[in-house]
Image (cartoon, rainbow, N blue to C red):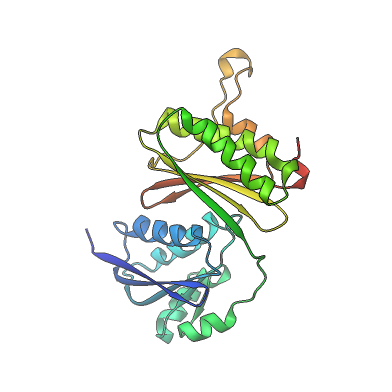
Amino acid sequence: MSPLTVTADTAGLAFVLTVDGVLDSSTYLQLRDAIVKAALDGPRAVLVDVNNLAVPAPSAWAVFTSARWLVDTWPAVPIHLVCGHSVVRRTIAANGITRYVRVHPTIGEALSALTDTTRARTRAKTQLPASLASLRSAREFVAQRLAEWSFDDLIASTTVVVNVFVENVLQHTPGGMVLLLETDGNSVTVSVQDSSTAPAARHEDSRRGGESVSGLAIVASVCRAWGSVPTPSGKTVWAVIGPENRL
């Protein structure tokens, strides 16, 4: 396996990931998931320094657009590349990456290019064990935090979502989970991180004429958007609940 290391640092409110090594089929997912995890932590932007990254096959540069698509709706954190080599920047552009991910010669120029278009976010996080008691704990956590944030009208729909997410973790994974609530002042996002690499997916039971509806189908009906993104240690399943989703 080709070695690849990703070192994390900060520059202002942005995260900087410095990548060293070879990007190929054996390290593609490692790099994608590292970028996604950095974005899920909620920085203003993720800057990826690729000056020391070797990319034998130009098509592998698509890892950056793949990561960007996974976080496009939530947390909607921009991803920028930093590359001081003009030839490499042209290669990145020639492969269509710059249509989705901007590339800059220096970290300073990347920071200067950031536009402050995102709302300030308030976050609350709790860790839950692999226990049925976590269902009650998750509901109480949602009710308390949303009341503090003056989102009482979204407690019911958010509780429906968190019930499904926590139940799925308890049914399909052996470990605990991390529950995160976030608001930008307009909508609420609920996400649950677990240790399973299997992506969340809807599964309706057609044997009973469609009478059996999956939990994620219910989630889809009471939220603005939802998704599942891979992380280095498993996955994060999220849903955005807006004012239109009141129950």
Query: Residue at the spot x=49%, y=38% of the render?
Result: 200
- Please identify the quadrant where the N terminus is shown: bottom left
> How far from the left and from the top, in percent, is residue 167?
50, 30
Residue 214: x percent and y percent?
57, 27
Coordinates of residue 40 in the picture (x, y in percent):
50, 57
Classify residue 54 as left or right of residue 82.
left
Residue 87 spot, x, y in % from top left: 41, 84
**Residue at x 42%, y 67% (from the top left corner):** 61
Give the total of numbered labels: 0
Looking at the image, residue 113 lies above or below residue 229: below
Left or right position of 200 against 99: left
Q: Which of 102 and 241 is in front in this view?
A: 241
| Image: 242 above or below 97 | above
Kindly give the residue lying farthest to the top in the view shown.
208
Observer able to see residue 100: yes
Residue 219 visible to an observer of this rendering: no
